[in-house]
Image (cartoon, rainbow, N blue to C red):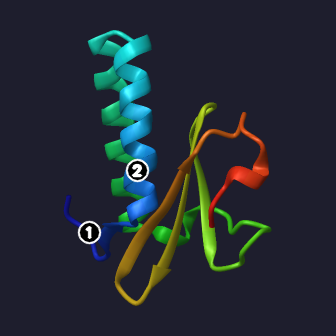
């Protein structure tokens, strides 16, 4: 992934991704999983090339929010030339479960 910003994942975001992958492998076909993975990769590429493209959250002003699918929202923050993925969240969950 070529861009001006380096992309890092927080430990909690990696845990969120792992949980999503576990769920998808149980419920979805391999084709659907590949489509999701491509969509995630393209969105991360877009975020790393233009991190100010998506709106800031109301919960914390330094965190931005990008809706990937109706079941997955990416939360991230930027500092200097670094984008850190803070969380992947399912908006169907109670908002208090979102760890920002």
In this view, 87 is above or below 58: above
Which disc, if any, is residue 15? Answer: 2
Q: Secondary structure at mark 2?
A: helix
From the viewer's perspective, tell me whether residue 83 is left or right of residue 76: left
Residue 50 numbered mark, or none = none
Q: Which one is in front, 31 or 94?
A: 94
Q: Which residue is mark 1?
A: 3
Q: Residue at x 71, y 78 (%)?
A: 61
Please identify the quadrant where the C terminus is shown: bottom right
Estimate the x, y position of residue 88 in percent, counting from the top left: 52, 49
Q: Nearer the viewer, residue 30 or 54?
A: 30
The answer to whether 45 is drawn above or below residue 55 in the figure is: above
Quarter of the figure with residue 54: bottom right
Left or right of 56 in this view: 67: left
The local secondary structure at tag 1 comes to loop
Mark-to-mark CA distance, 1 and 2: 25 Å
Local packing at callout 1 (Cα closer than 10 Å; few below 14, some 14-19, many 20+) is: few
Q: Position of residue 81 (x, y in %)?
A: 35, 84
């Amino acid at each position: 992934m070529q861009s001006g910003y380096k992309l890092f994942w927080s430990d909690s975001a990696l845990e969120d991704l792992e949980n999503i992958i576990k769920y998808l492998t149980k419920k979805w076909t391999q084709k659907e999983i590949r489509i999701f993975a491509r969509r995630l990769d393209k969105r991360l590429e877009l975020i790393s090339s233009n991190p100010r493209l998506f709106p800031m959250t109301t919960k914390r002003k330094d965190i931005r929010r990008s809706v990937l699918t109706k079941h997955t929202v990416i939360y991230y923050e930027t500092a200097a030339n670094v984008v850190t993925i803070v969380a992947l969240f399912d908006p169907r969950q109670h908002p208090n479960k979102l760890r920002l």
